[in-house]
Amino acid sequence: MLNRTSTFTLFTLLSCFVFLPKHGNTQENGEGKSGKVESSYLKEVEQLAKTKPLQAAFQSILDQTQRNRNELIMLTEIPAPPFMETKRGERFASMLKEAGADSVWTDKEGNVLALRKGKKRTRTVAFDAHLDTVFPLETKIKVSNNADTLFAPGIADNTRGLVLLLSVVRALEEAKVETEADVLFVGSVGEEGLGDLRGTKFLFTDQSRRIDSWIAIDGGETGTLINMGLGSFRYRVTFRGPGGHSWGAFGLANPQHALGSAIHYFSKAADKFTRSGARTSYNVGRIGGGTSVNSIAFESWMEVDMRSEIPENLNMVDSLLKASIQQALVEHNAMKRMGPALTVEIKKIGDRPSGELPESLPLIQRAMAATTYFGVSPRLTRGSTNSNVPISKGIPAITLGQGGKTGNNHALNEWWYDEKDSYKAIQLALLTLVSEAGLAK
């Protein structure tokens, strides 16, 4: 039980705002920044791209265009909500085996993994696309098309990434491209929503093999490179009380009223805090509870999402949320006229780490050089993807765009447009991968 002095916690936090330093950031408007590529990496990537094995791999990717389209439709129509990716994962695993990976297996978390052994085998470069989509199992998924545009939930995010990964595996096999490092192809689980990056988090524990570099494919057009992880916390907050009749039990503490106050206090405090400094956001995304209009609820809940470019701000807005909840709890327990006190449960349901990697890292330089080779200006940006995990650990990581044009991601009318040169995004990804893994001599 909280005492009344807890009521002052929120105001103590608010009083500190004026002393918080203002942080610079590289993507306050969400558009990213142009990356500077060193000439040595431009030369390295250009020479690599002109080798016979890479030219053969590029041609293989071009030849796969119709096959990739057919596989995109087929995989899209296999539902894969977070925690329910098994069916799609099984199909994806069989396709990896058919593509020619040395070994294919599914780990304890559900990630589908395929190893392509390198010549030296002293390093492992991971190449990832996530299996899951945001849509619940009951969502009707049937791909429709209008000319070169395909429509279906999840077709872009991230089924297109899975197809890109498969195309790279086939191209490497068909062109007989051998790398110095091992390449671990990953169909990861739990990237979306409450999946909370669970697949990638598992891959960076001592229960999995060491990964030295990480390349993810997830949304975005060609040229979009994510080297900065957008951190987030997510909570489910539940106020509970005895509940009762709105007239006969009037005077009981009301969980719905307490929840409303908590949202009000949090919105005011978070609004003030997020108006300066590094970009930080907050959102009460879902609320629920109660049984009828003439009943005092016995339970009231909300789900909250908070994000920030830097850990310090994320921790601060997290503190504001908890202080607001406690202030509402104390005040509404003080207001009750009879019955037991309200309780509150604050359960963390999401924790995505943040961080930034310098553009001088070889992997990021190689990705930018490969992008430049294909005539596109690289744009370094921030995002919430599987790369958040390795980025937060200081492990070289980058998320590349899938190519083509996309729209309405996470909506039922999501679409992907197959541009004439969308195959170049696959070639770009392959070039980045081989550059990082090293072409065996």
Image (spheres, grey):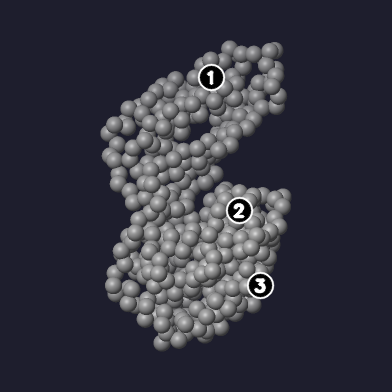
Label 3: state its secondary structure: helix
Q: Which mark is residue 99?
A: none
Q: Which residue is nearer to you in this view: 42 or 337?
A: 42
Q: Is 11 left or right of 88, judged from the image as shown?
A: left
Which numbered disc, 1 or 3, marks the residue closer to the eye?
3
Residue designated by label 2: 414
Q: Quadrant of residue 337?
A: top right
Q: Which residue is nearer to you in this view: 227 or 347?
A: 227
User: Which residue is rendered at x = 63% and y = 68% of the image?
Assistant: 69
User: In the rendered structure, which amino acid carries the disc numbered 3?
Assistant: Ser
Q: Is 46 left or right of 3, judged from the image as shown?
A: left
Q: Position of residue 160 (x, y in %)?
A: 58, 63
User: In the rendered structure, which amino acid carries the disc numbered 2?
Assistant: Glu
Instruction: Please rate how many residues cluster around mark 2, counting C-alpha atoms within 10 Å: few if below 14, some from 14 to 19, many from 20.
Output: some
Label 1: state its secondary structure: helix
Instruction: Please rate how many residues cluster around mark 3, counting C-alpha atoms within 10 Å: few if below 14, some from 14 to 19, many from 20.
Output: few
Work out how far the residue at label 3 is from the one at label 2, CA to CA, in angstroms.
Answer: 27 Å
Which numbered disc, 2 or 1, marks the residue closer to the eye?
2
Residue designated by label 1: 333
User: In the rendered structure, which amino acid carries the disc numbered 1?
Assistant: Asn
Residue 140 vs 400, above or below: the answer is: above
User: Which residue is rendered at x = 41% and y = 37% of the image?
Assistant: 317
Work out how far the residue at label 2 is from the one at label 1, CA to CA, in angstroms.
Answer: 46 Å
User: Which residue is rendered at x = 45% and y = 55% of the image?
Assistant: 388
Q: Position of residue 391 (x, y in %)?
A: 41, 58
Report if residue 310 is visible in the image: no
Q: Quadrant of residue 51?
A: bottom left
Residue designated by label 3: 94
For the C terminus, the quadrant is bottom left
Counting residues from the N terminus, which is met first, the one under dot 1 or under dot 3? 3
